[in-house]
Structure formats: C-alpha cells, structure tokens
Amino acid sequence: MKNITISDVAEALGVSKTTVSRAISGKGRIGAETREKVLAYIEKHNYTPNVIAKSLAQSKTYNIGVMIPAEYDITDLPFFQSCLFGIQEIAATMDYDILLTISKPEDTSHLERIVTNRKVDGVILMRTFVDDKQAKVLAKRGLPFVTIGSTNVEQAIQVDQDHKNACKELTSILLMKKMTRIALIGGDENHVVTQNRLRGYIEAFEDAGIPVIEDLIYLGANNQVLLEQRVEDILQKGADCIISMDDALCGNVLKKLRAEHVKVPGDIKIASFYNSSLLENNVPSITSLSFDEKELGMVACRNLMDKIEDKETHKTTTLGYQVILRESTQ
Amino acid sequence: MKNITISDVAEALGVSKTTVSRAISGKGRIGAETREKVLAYIEKHNYTPNVIAKSLAQSKTYNIGVMIPAEYDITDLPFFQSCLFGIQEIAATMDYDILLTISKPEDTSHLERIVTNRKVDGVILMRTFVDDKQAKVLAKRGLPFVTIGSTNVEQAIQVDQDHKNACKELTSILLMKKMTRIALIGGDENHVVTQNRLRGYIEAFEDAGIPVIEDLIYLGANNQVLLEQRVEDILQKGADCIISMDDALCGNVLKKLRAEHVKVPGDIKIASFYNSSLLENNVPSITSLSFDEKELGMVACRNLMDKIEDKETHKTTTLGYQVILRESTQ
DNA sequence: CTGAAAGCGCTTACAG
DNA sequence: CTGAAAGCGCTTACAG
C-alpha cells in the first residue's frame, strides 16, 4: 500500500525522473510522445504527486493563510463566512488550500508562527485596523498579502467595499428626506472601516451644507449597557434617525427602543449596515446598506494568487454597494 | 537573508546535524550540556525549523483538515464559527494548523484532493449525514478523523451534542405544560442530527403515554415559501406549540406568525434550538435548547490529536445541553 | 552520548 | 529532446 512515486514511474517506463517530472509539470522541453506515455501511465496507475516533496523542492506550500479576527461579536457576523466562501472557491481552482487562523488582532503570535513555519505562500487579512500589527508583520517579512478593508501599510494589496461612499449616499438620502439630527452609532474605532464610514457621514453633511452635530456621533459602543445608555442619550437629544454600523448593533438598538416604547419609524427612523439575515425578520423592515461579501472574497483571493505568481495586480480594488430603502426610514 | 538551517547550526557549533536535530526535538539520548549549547545558539540566532522539510522526513503535515458543509443557510448559523474557534484553540497549542474546506457534502472532490495531496494528518467533519460520503472516503483511506455529530461509519471517532435527549426533555416539559398538539419543524432529513431530534420528540410522547400526531411533524423545510405553507397548515390543524430545529428556521416561523397576526405565546407557543444571537432580541424571548459549541470543537480536536498520535481515544463522546425556558412557552 | 550516511519525493541548473 | 546529479532541510536507523 506504499504510495507510488516519480521514481517508480520513471523506472517502469525506462525514462528518467527528470522526464517524468517535466511531463507532469509541463515545464521544460519534452517530446509529445514521451509526455503522452508518462501521462497515460500515471493516469492508469493513479499516481499522485507528493505535494510536500514538491513544496520542499520549490519552497512553495500551495497554502494561503486567512486571518479572522477573534472578536466579541464574531458569532454575530455572517460576513466572514460569506467572504471565506468566495476565497475558497478561487483558491480551490488554483489547487491552493486555506490555512485558517482565528486570533486577536493585537496578538500576532499565530500569524508569526505560520509565517515562520513557512506554512503559507501568502496571507489574506479579513479585517484591517488603524494600527495594524498583523499587516506590519507581513510587510516586514515581505510575504505577499492582501487586506480586506483599507490600510495605510504600504505593501498591502487592498480590496475593499466602498463603505465611505455607501455611508455618504445613505446619509445624503436621509438628509434629503428632511432628517437632520441623524445619530451615528459605530463599532470599534480601531477598525479602518469605522473611520471610513464616519468620513462618508460627514461628507454628506458638508455636501448638503448642513452642520454635523458632533454630539450625535458615538463610536466604540461595545457592550449592551453602554449602548443602552447611548440610545437614551440619543432619544433625549431629539434625534430623528439612528444609523448603526452593523446589524448586530442595530438589533440591540431596536431592542432598546422597543423597551422604551419608541416607535420605528413613527418616532425615530433607523438604518443599518450589511443587510444580513440578522434583521431579515424585523418588523418594520430595516433600511440597509448591502455589500457582496462572496465577491469580495473572490477578488481578494484572485489578487493574492496573482501576487504570489508575480503577475500584475491592482494595488487597490474597491467594490460597490447597494442602498436598500425600507419601512424603517419612511 | 537566507534562512538559517540545521546544518548552519551544526557547523557553527562543531557538532553533527543529528545532534542538533535531537536537541530540538528532544528525542533520542543527548548530553544535557550539549543540548543547552544548541538551544542557546538557536535562540540567539533565532533559528526556526523548516516545517516542510520536517514534514517530508516524517510524513506528517502538522495540519488538520476541517470540512464545513456548504449549505444554503450556512451564513445563518453561528454554530460553525464557535466550533471552529474551539478547534483552533486546541490545535494551536499542539502546533497544528487548520486547513479549512467548504464543500457540498455529496461532493467529495475537495476532500479527496487534500487527502490525496497529503496535506493533512487527520480530518474533522463538522456535520454528519445519513449517507455520509465524506466519512466513507476517510474510512476507506484509513486517515484518522472525527465527526461532529453521530454517524454509522464505523471507523469514525464521534463527538456529539445530546440532541436526542435535549429534544426529548424539551418535549416532555411542553407535554407537562399540557400542550399535546406540538408541531415539529425540522431541517434537512439527511442530517443525522435531524433524525436524533425526531427520535427524542417521539420518545417524549411515548414516555408520557400520549400518541404522537404524525401530521404535525414536518421535516425538510428548506425554503421560505414551503415553510409559510407549513405554518399555515400547522395553524389550521390547531397546534398549540411549534418546535423549530434551528434559530434561523424559528425566525422565519415567527415572521410568518407575525404576518398572520398570531400572538406568541398567547395563541401558540414557540421553542427553538441553539439559543443563538439570531433570536436574542426577539420579543417575546424564545425558549431554546442551548449547547456549548466551542467546547464541542475543543473536544473534537483533542480527540483527533490523540488519534493522530496513536493514543487512546474515546470512540464516542456526548456533550450536555441546557433547556432555557422563556416567555414564548409561558 | 554522538556522528556519518541514507532517505523522504520532488525540482532544476547543467551538460549533452 | 533527455538524463545524471545535486539540492531542498529535515529525521532516523545503524554503528560506535
């Protein structure tokens, strides 16, 4: 039951290992006839190459690392799963596999381990941070990597959804609908994406010539108690709309409003990000920004593959969005 | 910038590669003094072993494969993420990495590829099926593997949550509360777990000496239209309670009930599985069965590691559950 | 306790 | 177009 190797094939066919290797890889000159002969034999005796040996000889692993941040709310966000799906779809077609790592973004030990152990040819970071330790590690090591989300680490190949313009367009529409006291509740301030959304929000006000009410901007709400306080605050300040930066957050906002007997959209309008299944069943239906996460993963992976194989790559790719207006802002 | 190898260390220290290898691995006799010397040098020049070379020499990859089913509702279920988290936590401590593959359970091509390419030392199947192609492939290849969920494939090491008894206890409680027309809406009939839950449901009726109403059992509801029809059916048949086999399903049931102006728990009681964030914000709060997914992943991984290293392993492990009674069944 | 040597299964200059 | 040989960086009987 021992595995058949390239030597076995060579011996059986009376050719050299070199020839067999060439027939398989398609690299180097080789006679058509010889190639056919080798390929036929291989097929018949179903020889399968030992990828580890190939790895060692080529210093390639045919693995890509995918880093998922271990966040408190990770179980709430379908985002990563959809995205991963896209990555895998592309990777599989190129005969690459995915080495998955879940870790806290400030803890680079897992990342350093897989890099040090040379277990991957490149890495995809599923989320970027304002001070991005992981991106820096990769830049320093000189390993190809792409970030999902923008970053100021120069060496990164970036693929991003256009959160800034998405948030800007949403805010503009709300302003057009005569809301002006629009509260913005945000996720982690260390996420680049949070900053981008904020920028979009502000630009919308600027374009409309309406002053931003700084008081209504709340970033970094990361627990239920704090969030409830903020919602109370917002209500007291007489806001006419709340934009939440993700559906999990928005779900909690809605919960609090319900508890306070505040009607949506009667008393206050509501909008959210991601259009995920989390709020799918909410009554009223929730206005939301929608992105294509699977496509995002596919593009990220394709770019990484290109970079690994030293092909030309776009340094930055930005994907679109949809604004879906529903009952909650009517 | 070339990587320092075991030969470099050996040469620098005037010892043999064998000695260096032994100092690092801790295998084989070696003098304490020599070992210290090697270790110190390695530390100072931060030598890191080439895992690929080690792999080739040992025929080990230090990777475990994790197979996630590509299901229509995968984005809805936080289950896999929590479980994965547990797996990775254990794997990392053993210096193993996770090779993740998402694929349709009837399509074994991805699995066969990673096995054929010898990219993993063992596999965890995240879900089992009544006719489990993936488990069969692994059994045939003789690779160590553990299944999350039970299976009739003999070679499998199984780790499961006690869905049968969980469902039985829940049903018993509902029966005790004088509900008897309890509808059961299930997921895919090909999932072993679906069958186990059904068994628990039936046993509860048997134990109570109450006849099961076959008419109220609906398995395989996999789209919204069909589901809505079934809910209409259930209402018409005068059921007093609906148990849904997962929170995504339950969310859709609740949506339909709301549309029909049926009050929960006034007109009908509701119970669900998983106790996930999906229904966290629902009003009324939903009675649910709760499992520890992360623990599940940890146990699965630990068992696989043991199997890979030829240690004793429990052939079957069953983890507990909690019944959380809330407003929806009051 | 230590080392020389073969081996893991490929790839790839180099030579012909 | 084809091959002999060295090399990738480890591990591991075997001998001493």
Image (cartoon, coloured by chain):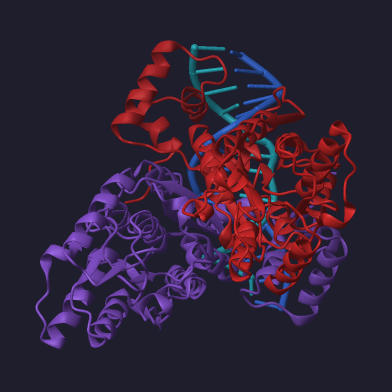
Chain colours: A red, B purple, C blue, D cyan
> Which residue: 45% across, 36% down?
A6
Residue B25 lies, in percent from the top left, at 65, 69
Above or below — where is A93 with respect to A134?
above
Q: Position of residue A100 (x, y in %)?
A: 59, 53
Tell me: residue A146, above or below residue B317. above
Q: Nearer the viewer, residue B199 or B15?
A: B199
Residue B124, percent across and down?
42, 61
Q: Which one is nearer the viewer's eye here, B133 or D8?
A: B133
The part of the image, by quadrant, that contains residue B255 is bottom left
Left or right: residue B237 versus residue A29 is left
The answer to whether residue A330 is visible is yes
Given residues B135 and B32, the one toward you in this image is: B135
Which residue: 66% across, 35% down?
Answer: A304
Q: Residue at x 33, y 30 (%)?
A: A43
Q: Which residue lies furthest to the front in this view?
A: A266
Q: Nearer the viewer, residue A298 or B249?
A: B249
Inspect this view and state whether residue B218 appears.
Answer: no
Q: What quarter of the picture does the C terminus of chain A occupy?
A: top right
How many tags in the picture? 0
Name the spot of residue B314 as percent of width and height, x first.
Answer: 36, 79
